[in-house]
Image (tube, rainbow, N blue to C red):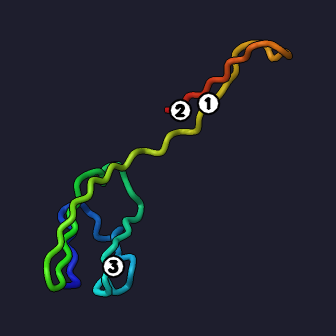
Amino acid sequence: DHHVNYGSSGLQDRVAFVQTDPGQRDASIRVADLQESDTGTYQCRVKKNTVAVHEVIVTVQEKPAAPQCWSEGELIEGGSVLLRCFSR
């Protein structure tokens, strides 16, 4: 029915239909600027002739920091070297 209910999550400025006319069989949405607080269960209910309901669980994780890498051991031919990386 060309009506979108965003609930109380503050998504109204970040959600838009992928197609300009969702009545043409594609009610896909795009969420911009995802945040960890957007993690949750979302319900999509589309009504045309009948009502179709689908729930989606969305998990937003923080982008990891750049890894810190280093080597342990002597860099000599035939020797053993241990390469380590860590990211927060």
Q: Residue at x 38, y 69 (%)?
A: 30
Which of the labelled discs sits on residue 87, or is there none? 2
Which of the labelled discs sits on residue 59, or is there none? none
Q: Is residue 59 left or right of residue 3?
A: right
Q: Residue at x 81, y 17 (%)?
A: 75
* Alpha carbon distance from label 3 to label 2: 39 Å
Which of the labelled discs sits on residue 26, or is there none? 3
Front-most of 8 and 61? Answer: 61
Image coords of residue 5 (percent x, y):
19, 72
Q: Please state which amino acid type lies under the numbered disc 1.
A: Gln
* Alpha carbon distance from label 1 to label 3: 44 Å
Q: Nearer the viewer, mark 1 or mark 3?
A: 3
Whether pointer 1 and pointer 2 mark residues with C-beta atoms closer than 8 Å, the reply is: yes
Image coords of residue 63 (percent x, y):
48, 45
Q: Residues within 10 Å of mark 2 (few under 14, many from 20)?
A: few
Whether pointer 3 and pointer 2 mark residues with C-beta atoms closer than 8 Å, the reply is: no
Q: Residues within 10 Å of mark 1 (few under 14, many from 20)?
A: few
Q: Please state which amino acid type lies under the numbered disc 2.
A: Ser
* Alpha carbon distance from label 1 to label 2: 6 Å
Mark 1 / mark 2, whichever is N-terminal: 1
Image coords of residue 19 (percent x, y):
38, 81
Q: Is residue 57 left or right of residue 71?
A: left
The residue tagged 1 is 68
Mark 1 / mark 3, whichever is N-terminal: 3
Mark 3 / mark 2, whichever is N-terminal: 3
Position of the N terminus by quadrant: bottom left
Q: How many marks?
A: 3
Q: Helix, strand, or loop for circle 1?
A: strand
Image coords of residue 16 (percent x, y):
35, 74
Q: Please state which amino acid type lies under the numbered disc 3.
A: Asp
Q: Residue at x 35, y 76 (%)?
A: 17
In the picture as drawn, the residue positioned furthest to the left comes out as 50
